Amino acid sequence: MASWIWLVPVLPLAGVLVNGLLGRRLGKRAVSLIGPGVVGAAFAAALVIFLALLGRPADDRTLSQTLYTWLSAGDFSATVGFLVDPLSATLMLVVTGVGFLIHVYSAGYMHAEDDAGFARYFAYLNLFTFAMLLLVMADNFLLLFVGWEGVGLCSYLLIGFWFKERENAEAGKKAFIVNRIGDFGFLLGIFLIFGTFGSVAFADVLPEAADTLAPGGDLAYWICLLLFVGAVGKSAQIPLYVWLPDAMAGPTPVSALIHAATMVTAGVYMIARAHALYLMAPAILAVVAGIGALTALYAATIGLAQTDIKKVLAYSTISQLGYMFLGVGVGAFTAGIFHLVTHSFFKALLFLGAGSVIHALHGEQDMRRMGGLKADLPVTYWTILLATLAIAGIPPLAGFFSKDEILWRVWEAGHPALWVIGFATAGLTALYMFRLFFLTFHGGFRGPTEARAHVHESPPSMAIPLVVLGALSVFGGWIGLPHALGGPLGGIPNAFEEWLAPVFHAAAEIHGAAPGGGGTAADGAAHGAPAIEYALMAASVAVALLGILLAWSLYVRNPALPAVLSARSRGLHRLVRDKYYVDEIYAALVVRPFDALSRFAWRAVDDGLIDGLGVRGTGWLVGLGSRVASRWQSGYVQGYVVVFFGGVVAILAYYLFGG
Amino acid sequence: MANFYLTAILFLPILGMALVAGIPGARRTAIRQATLAVTTLHFLIALPLWWLYDPAGEPYQFVERVPWIEPFGIEYHLGVDGVSILLALLTILLMPLSVLGSWRYIDRHVKEFHLLLLLLTTAMLGVFFALDLFVFYVFWELMLVPMAFVIGIWGGEERVYAAVKFFLYTFVGGLVMLLGIVVLYFHYQQMTGGYSTALPDLVALEIAGGMQLALFLAFAFAFAIKVPMFPFHTWLPDAHVQAPAAGSVILAAVLLKMGTYGFYRFAMPLFPDAARVLLPWIAGLAVVGVIYGAMVALVQPNMKKLVAYSSVSHLGFVMLGLFALNAIGVQGAVIQMINHGLSTGALFFLCGMLYERRHTYRIDELGGLSASMPLFAAIFMIVTLSSIGLPGLNGFVGEFLILVGIFQSHPYLTAAATVGVILAAYYMLRMYGRVMFGPAGREANRDVPDLGARELWILVPIVLLIVWIGVYPRPFLDRTAPSVDRFVEIVTREAPSGAGLAGASQVPASR
């Protein structure tokens, strides 16, 4: 078993080579088989591994394989090696499973590209899958970082896929550079981990964390903070989220795969993976939870006022990622990963559905020119409805269980203020998502009439992934039924929690009675369900329904009202619509001053100070130069080689023998 | 054969010069073909060094040592360790590529150009092979001459200014070093009663603190100019911008390495106490170079100048790694020397190819080239990513090891240097985006011909090496590890008598 887990990442890599080197000549048909095919095969392999793990006893669900020693110098050494445990197996299934659906969808969505563009697209998408698998399967921090930067590269390449538009290329570059700022922290974190533990392998670092690091000590504090800086960049949290909305310049399936379902969740995965370190730094966990909650609320408010359908989804993703960080920040690692999984279903679906709408409207992304598409796009309509209900947190859809799990853990960990933020965000989520839904599908069509005539439902290659993801958005949450509900329903266990329990058992031990953080379903059920858990559950459903109702009354019943409201509070509306001017603030405070400083360094220091300080020397130099030049131009080069060389030898001899 | 293998490699280009000199100047293609044949053959002859060198064996291998100027104790003394092998092979590999890269670029004085290239090859190899300070110095200065001519004759509009600036800068540095060599020479005589310029003899010599400091500074001055370290770098942008493509490639890939190699081979092992005392200053200047070079690169309107300043930044990393004084950092520095040679060499080749098509290096006159040059775009992208240290490609291996190495002793300097990693992405991707992406803008940027076969022969080997070192650097690291360990041992060895820099008294030599 362990001997072929390398196959999972290598299959997409083979796709990269074939599509990248030969794809142009193979033609679109072959590429559209190979591109999704290799990812489907990787999914099958991941599934086999998953089932094999499932067949083992809970404490023996770890596979590892070391391919070779990659870097070794002095006492530093890092391998290319894989670790498959329940956590990475979960992510492998998400990456290859959702990834496969999006690859299939892409074959339809990108059909207008020429052969070269089509092959390039699938080469990039396969490369992304490879890098993402490297990220989740790595058995050490350095290889994780390789995958981490690799997915960043693919993100850069795919955001700027249509590079002839200046804005697309700019957006890709921005994503890469902002991520690099985060990676700066990640790298320093790795240095510090090596300095502390003498290794970067998970097997050497994580089990030793409790012994080596003092709880709440400086070392734990800095390691975790630095790693979190990386997570903030990659997972688009405050203050480094600014690249993600711009990343919507990429093709929509890319947004679904990279900027919703997989890559952006890497930060959550990394913290869950390194949870043994984070448990030694409670202060940083609090920072993680705080940043997560703040980002969740902040991004949701911006989502309320966007008119570009993809931008709404982008801010929604930022907000949902905030939820995940809120979860892991209060030590509920299972809940954070659970939301990561369900979110990958419904958010991928939302993006693909939006892509289907955009496709039908020939590139239109502005919701102000949509409306009434319900009848024309039935598959898209119904699947998006399911995903919207799921993200809004309506039971029994996927989002309800995972979001509620996080909110409950937050409350239970004793953070009522964070719970209130999460609760309020739940209401806003329902509001902005149903705003999107109603503006797109209900009411009358607001675009140009000729556009309306061409509206058509997407081909099967695009529709089938929507349906599959729709089913997952409905049923996907049932793998993680909370004990409060599963218990009364005849003792249905929280399967997801049990599955991940061996990974997070350290967390459970340290958090003591954190219910269900580990142990068996029986333990959890015995723990009982306090009335307050039901009350909070009811509250979050109620606030979601309130949000939906509000959206309905604003965008279906009184469609004129939003304009009136926003006119009445024009300043506030503009502030939110223009995203609190954060991009402008960064440009004014960071980017432009830095460019100016660089220019100063060039003109004043290089040209002025260094070259200018020796002004006389330089003048003399130029004088000599022109004399030499006038002779060189006479053309007898060989002669001057001899003269020059002779001069050098003469000077040399003089110094040597004279000295 | 092993007895004069290095000599054979060293002087084969001179033989080649005789061959090329025999071809009439008007037969340009024949000259190019002959030089290509010579340099390719040279590479094939030198390549077995890769296997014949035994990392576990003697510190210096293929040693040749015969008396030369006997009364002065000067010997013709060559030998290589793992580091010089790699640098020499890089040099020899780049020569046929440079000939190919000049095929169309150089169209005047074709014969002279190729003769100088061959002369330059011998000079550069001599620097890497020399184990005698006098031999080293001869080759060090010899290398200067052909390079200055290459810039001054085949360069751009301000070529003469650039060539003279290059020549004087490095020549002044060389003279200061020569002074140091002479002082060291007489110091050796005083201590031992004999004369020697052999590196092993001089490394074993004990030198009092004050003198060590002065001598180190004399050597370091020459090397720092060559690296170039901030603030001795201003010759570099001019030289690069004016030099023809092949000149820039050799300048960046090999000549800059002479500076860091000089620190590795001579300045630091000869004067270890001084190196340790000055470490904070040099490491500090290296970090300034990393950040400063990146900042100035950012605002360059000229592609070639941007790449030139990026070298200042990259070589700052190398210096930082050398002064980490542990095996991790020094290994990183060594592999980064190779990496910089490959990626910056490739960048200058690419600049040259672009120039042949568009006759400009100005970033604002270019744009949207990806549309008509997909192959060029792909290779340019890989090289760019290598230059900004993307994991999986070679640049990351070096930068990472350097930073891990220096982090152990200087975490704050490391943090500052790591900012350079962000900035590298900023200036390189900004330049790439402006040149390759977006609308074509000018008519001249449309339908630009893509790479041809000759150009692929130049670039593909480099790209393969970039990927190889990135994915599986072991063969490179393993070859240099014992040499690096020895270097670290020598440089970190405390003066046995406690007569470090504190005790300035004369200490008897111990041999």
Image (cartoon, coloured by chain):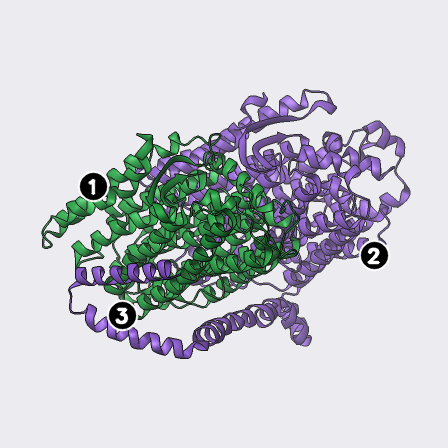
Chain colours: A purple, B green
Residue A253 in view of the camera: no
How far apart are the two marked residues, 2 and 1, measured between alpha carbons? 76 Å
Nearest-to-viewer mark from 2 and 1? 1
Q: Which residue is mark 3?
A: B157
Q: Which residue is mark 1?
A: B37
Which quadrant of the figure has residue B286? bottom right
Q: Which x, y percent locates residue A141?
A: 62, 40
Horizontal arrangement in the rendering, residue B20 relative to residue A493 (left or right) = left
Q: Chain of mark 1?
A: B
Q: Identify the mark nearer the N-term, 3 or 1.
A: 1
Rendered view: A77 above or below A258: above
What residue lies at 37% left-to-right and 49% top-to-bottom? B72
* Type of amino acid at the residue the image marks with label 1: Ala
Which type of secondary structure does the marked residue at label 1 adopt? helix
Q: Which residue is mark 2?
A: A417
* Type of amino acid at the residue the image marks with label 2: Ala
